[in-house]
Image (spheres, grey):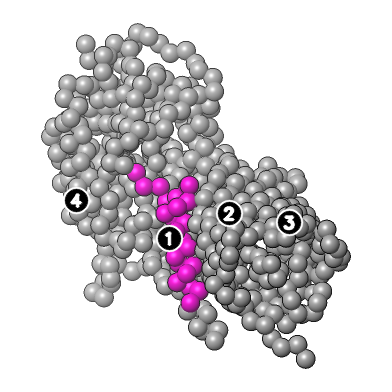
Amino acid sequence: MNINTDIKSIICLSLFTIIITVSTAAESMDVNHNWQSETAFILPQKRYEIGLFQPLRYGYSESVELSIHPIIALVMPNISLKKSLATRTDFIISSRHAMYYPTPLLRLISKEGIGGMISPEFEIPHMISLYNEIILTKPLTDSHYFTIKSGLNLAVKSSKLDERTTIDLPLIFPRLAVFYRGSGLRGGCDLTGKIFQNWKYLVDADIFYFFNTDEKFAMEHKGMILWNTSENFQISIGYKLTFCEYPFGNQWHLFPLMDIQWSRQLKIR
Amino acid sequence: MILQIVKMRLPVSVLIIICSLIFSCEPLVTKFEDIEKAEFYKAKNISSVPNDVDTVVFMTWNIRFGAGRIRWFGDCCGDRVILTENEVYENLEGLVQKIDEIKPDIIFLQEVDVESKRTGYIDQVQWLLDHTHFNYGAYASMWQAQVVPSDGLGRVNTGNAVLSRWKIIDAERIQLPLREDQDALTQYFYLRRNILKTEIEVPGLSEFCAINIHMSAFCTDDTKERQIIRLLEELNNLKDAAFVLGGDFNLIPPGSDSVDFCDEDKCPDESFHGANDDPYHKEGSYFGDEITLMQALYDEYKPALPLLKYQNNQDYYFSHSTDEAGFWDRKLDYLFSNYEWIDNSDSTHQEARSLSDHAPVTAKWRIPK
């Protein structure tokens, strides 16, 4: 068999990697509730944040935050909305509603030659993922927060997706599993806090659960150290540990994580 | 602005892939040591074996990962990549039926898939052990990748296996030289051919090795020559131990009438042998420069099928063809030993045309006293 090097194909593969990494990489926090995408806190109004692997997040109002992966949206349209539901001194509750349309991206990587992650012999139908979750954050002290979240993932398809199109890689497999199963549950918890001065930590765990399949369960855990060099710039580094039930058996993977994030506060008129 | 971000992000994503390769618990592609232990297998139910035997029947068979004659994209101008589980089980059952019919004592298998995406994630070594009279197995992968990011191949683990009625007490995977006519990226994801050397408790023998080899097929440099040299080194190291060597050598015997199979193997949109054709020959289909490479084995060891016998009736011993519709057109599969074979016990089972692109080759070996 010949495998020819094709730079466009490598870019396709890289884009795909970006998408997965973007959606799973570091999140962070601040005593002002900036940099806290995975907590129930809403980004302050008119503030936007973006990172190498983070989505563009925007504080639309005092109770609504929007986010989008802008580059990825070219091949996988996506949007997420987080809405504050309740804010009390001892806890904060928000809901998150996200959708994405992976069909163009999957069709892009369904090809012959290098970069072909899915065999071109299969049809990729039109598919949309809808995800809704509730997020509850509880301050443990002035600078430490505990978050739990739980959600339901649903998929809508124009026709059946062949089971042989799975991409058996960590991070990717559990995120595409909903398109084969139709629905799935997700849940998790995060612990964030200040270490000293501008240094912070983040530890989290997320689980994925699917019904009517042998590959029911996946788990991801990460640990991050975050450094806010200023109010508008943050560097983070850490690791991600994954466990997943694949069609061929169970596997653990460990990855390094790194991100650089920028933010800007626009004036409120 | 968007262009700047794209430029900034793409190298980072490539970096992530590289980091993943380096730091991940399970690397994307498994590289192997020059010599390492093979994987051992045992049948679910152990069947009884004779403890007093004079002869042993050996078989070598490239089973084409249980794909039968399905027109797979990589080797026969096909367009199929990922087979269904049912297709694979059906083909495996055909293989088992043939094995049951011949009842070899020890079999050398090439292109056996273990939990590969293209073949329904079936562990074919274990499945074959559990559905035949063999009790023990050893496996050495030649291509093991979490994902091959090409053509949708995905997870691949395929290689050589030795299955035996008697216990396999040791098994080594010996790396063969890699192709050097590929760029680094292709080579990283490409096959790593090997020799699977097993030590088996054959009754009446104090030391016996069954050696399985699957050599490179599509190289355009001197890879096959280097692999033969490596094989001869390994055989020389065995000194007095009795051995049987079997496998798919991807070489035709010296004195073969035809050395050029470009026309037989070419796909509808391909052209070879024309003044402007580049390459001039199809990769893996021209043996003109390699016609003498098997000679050293014929000179130093005992073939199950003597060279003269082959040369006098070549069609009868052909063991490979890329096209199911055509007849077998070349011999690539061999059995050798440093001890005697039973005269005229060899057989090339050309009737098994629908089961693989290789025919099983068998012969009866006399246990040295």
Question: Label 2 is found on which chain of the structure?
Answer: A
Q: How far apart are marks 3 and 2 (CA)?
A: 20 Å
Q: Which of marks 3 and 1 is in front?
A: 3
**What is the x, y in percent for residue B132?**
50, 25
Secondary structure at badge 2 equals strand
Question: Label 4 is found on which chain of the structure?
Answer: B
Q: Which residue is drawn at 23% across and 74% down?
A: B275
Q: Residue at x 15, y 46 (%)?
A: B292
Residue of label 1: B18
Q: Nearer the viewer, mark 1 or mark 4?
A: 1
Residue of label 4: B290
Q: How far apart are marks 2 and 4 (CA)?
A: 56 Å
Please determine if labels 1 and 4 lie on a single subunit.
yes
User: Does residue B352 appear to the left or right of B366 in the view shown?
Assistant: right
Q: Residue A141 carries which label?
A: 3
Q: Which of marks 3 and 2 is nearer the N terminus?
A: 3
